[in-house]
Image: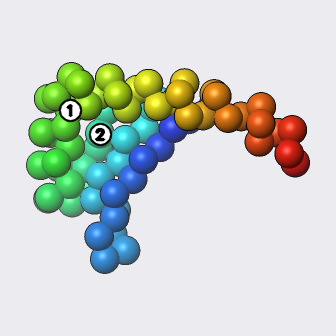
Amino acid sequence: IEFIESYYFNKKELTRFSSSVGKYVGFTEQGVRNAAAWNNDPSILSTMKAQKEGYCLHNIQIWYNNM
């Protein structure tokens, strides 16, 4: 299971956090600046890393039971 959070503007992906990478990755000039700022903040990174357990792993059994 992988948690991914992406930010888009005008249908272009600016920045993405992936739990398998463990940090933000920027795809545009603005996205690279945002990713660098967010990656330098330990509280943001720890919050995003915890989303895999708090959101994905918590809900996966519920989703499978409803299929």
> Which numbered tag is attached to residue 39?
1
Write down the quadrant of residue 53 in the picture.
top right
Residue shown at 82%/39% (left/top)?
Answer: 64
**Is residue 50 shown above or below 8?**
above
Going by the numbered disc 1, the residue's amino acid type is: Asn
The foreground one among 46 and 29 is 46
Disc 2 and disc 1: Cα gap in Å? Answer: 6 Å
Tag 2: Cα neighbours inside 10 Å, few (<14), some, or many (≥20)?
many
Q: Cβ–Cβ below 8 Å for labels 2 and 1?
A: yes
> Which numbered tag is attached to residue 23?
none
> What secondary structure is marked by label 2?
strand
> What secondary structure is marked by label 1?
helix
Left/right placement of residue 64 relative to residue 12 reads right
Residue shown at 39%/53% (left/top)?
Answer: 6
Q: Which residue is mark 2?
A: 24
Left/right placement of residue 52 relative to residue 10 reads right
Residue 21 visible in the current orientation: no
The colour scheme used here is rainbow
Residue shown at 35%/48% (left/top)?
Answer: 16
Give residue 67's position: percent from left, percent from top.
Answer: 87, 48
The foreground one among 35 and 52 is 52
Residue shown at 37%/41% (left/top)?
Answer: 17
Q: Earlier in the sequence, mark 2 or mark 1?
A: 2
Count of picture labels = 2
Residue 11 visible in the current orientation: yes
Q: Quadrant of the N terminus?
A: top right
Going by the numbered disc 2, the residue's amino acid type is: Tyr
Give residue 28's position: percent from left, percent from top.
Answer: 21, 60
Give residue 65's position: percent from left, percent from top.
Answer: 86, 38
